[in-house]
Amino acid sequence: MKQLIHGGRLLTAGRLAGEHANLLIDGDVILAVLPPDQRVTEDARRIDASNRLLIPGLINAHTHGTVNLAKALADRWSLELLLNAYPWTAGGRTLEYKHLSALIGAVEMVRKGCTACYDLVAEIPAPSVDGIEAVARAYDDVGMRAVVAPMMADVSFYRAIPGLLDAMLPPLRERAEAIRLQPYEASLATCRQLLTKWSWDRDRLRPALGPTIPHHCSDEFITGCGDLAKEHGIGVQMHVAESKVQAVVGMRRYGTTLVAHLHKLGLLAPNFTAAHAIWLDDDDIGRLADAGASVAHNPGSNFKLGSGLAATRKLRDRGVSIGIGTDGCASSDNLNMFEAMRMAAFSSRVQGPDPRHWLSAAEVFEAATIGGARALGLADRIGQLAPGYKADVVFLDLRSINYVPLNDPLLQVVFCEDGTGVDRVMVGGSMVVEGGAVVGVDMGRLVAEAASAAANLTEVNAGARALAQALEPVVLDYCVGLARRPYSVHRWCADPGH
Ligand SMILES: [Zn+2]
């Protein structure tokens, strides 16, 4: 079936002035971008986009679907306190809860103008085929695109940080020591099984692999993931140098930076995405650029956890493709890509006094669309409103207060829009949001199910919470001590704070 979206303004790569244009869609693909006065004689269903600004669906380059039930559980947590508490905040998920959690995230994302995401799925104690399928089904239920990757480790958080266990007193030390993760061979076997039986349309839902953090994974695990990804032509995403503690630990463990270590293991390639990528030196940035790898920049999470400021200008200038992510609800609470764009722009601006080095609205918009598409491995299909691309279209209501008055569509999308202007969202030619509501989702039921799940998880995870709280003081002191060690990063501006 053909559809004609007419009467709207178009904001996409190469058309950043937001001028009027019509979109002719055939099935799930954009057939043509037409001048507003060109008559279409073909038989096409007409969609009136008067007073609407049409943008490509935003692409969330980094999130965690199974922790959307954990939003706003914590206030002043660093990344290390978050990882300490993970068995509590992410544990106890039945298959039903994994689906429900991913559904909550998908509803929030599409409602706020995001049509595709890269999801590193946390499952405790280990990844499962059924768990990943439950998450994929949630995205399918909402009609969103997603790259779904089991997030995995074979070294516990307490063992991953040299000296942390020794800093604990018995009997807590015994309890932390007793936490052991599944051997990597078993996790790789699960991934192999998942990849073999993957039956979803890969333009809608595709698998990837997520060995979570370099020093939380043995070298054999990381290279195993790299090999498996090559064999199946899929992506790999890891959290890389997210916190200063991680960078310091990397040096101790490997005698090199984390990126240099991954480079040595042969992991850096165009199918690789480094999430966060804050504590990098110039050579690391060069390694990522030369490999054609992407960075998933998560400014909201980086601010909330106090992780630091990613050198986005330098990454971009050196040729690293940048996508923008929200991270998961356990770390940054909301999944609002408009807010993430705004923060990405701002986080580049507090790094130096010269506005010529700041990320522009156009650069940020490109990162949230084309950059994200590259990270997801879908650069030739999504991220633009142009012939041959999928019809993933967000309709922004220009009568929303965010556009009153309309001075500059691009700058208003990046600096004024907060998701409240989203009126309709189309994915692959089908509406998934109409009049601000997610099609086919009973919000009353979702609210009730989420409340019941949250209450149940409070009970189920009470023991894990008590242990995390008992361990918190020693994790806090030890990791703050590590973070106070000198570690040099090179930036385009002198930053004596590092
Ligand atoms: Zn993350």
Image (cartoon, helix red, strand yellow):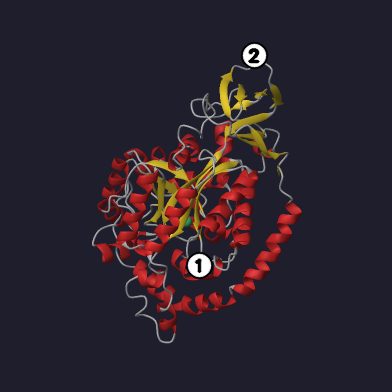
Asked if the residue at tag 1 contacts the one at tag 2, i.e. Cβ–Cβ closer than 8 Å, the answer is no
Q: Quadrant of the C terminus?
A: bottom left
Q: Tell which residue pokes out farthest to the left in this image.
A: 255
- Tell me if residue 311 comes above or below residue 166 in the rendering: above
Q: Does residue 347 appear to the left or right of 498 in the view shown?
A: right
Residue 461 x, y percent position in the rendering: 58, 73
Q: Residues within 10 Å of mark 1 (few under 14, many from 20)?
A: many
User: Camera-side residue: 438 or 285?
Assistant: 438
What residue is disc 1 on? 86
Instruction: Determine whether 410 is above or below 247 in the image.
Output: above
Near mark 2 (Cα within 10 A), the count class, few <14, some 14-19 or many ≥20, is: few
- Which amino acid lies under the numbered mark 2 shown in the image of this protein? Asp
Please name the residue that numbered disc 2 is placed on: 37
Q: Is residue 59 left or right of residue 281?
A: right
Quadrant in the picture for residue 174: bottom left
The answer to whether residue 482 shows anywhere in this view is yes
Q: Is residue 298 left or right of residue 404?
A: left
Estimate the x, y position of residue 387 in percent, counting from the top left. Answer: 53, 23
Quadrant in the rendering for residue 156 = bottom left
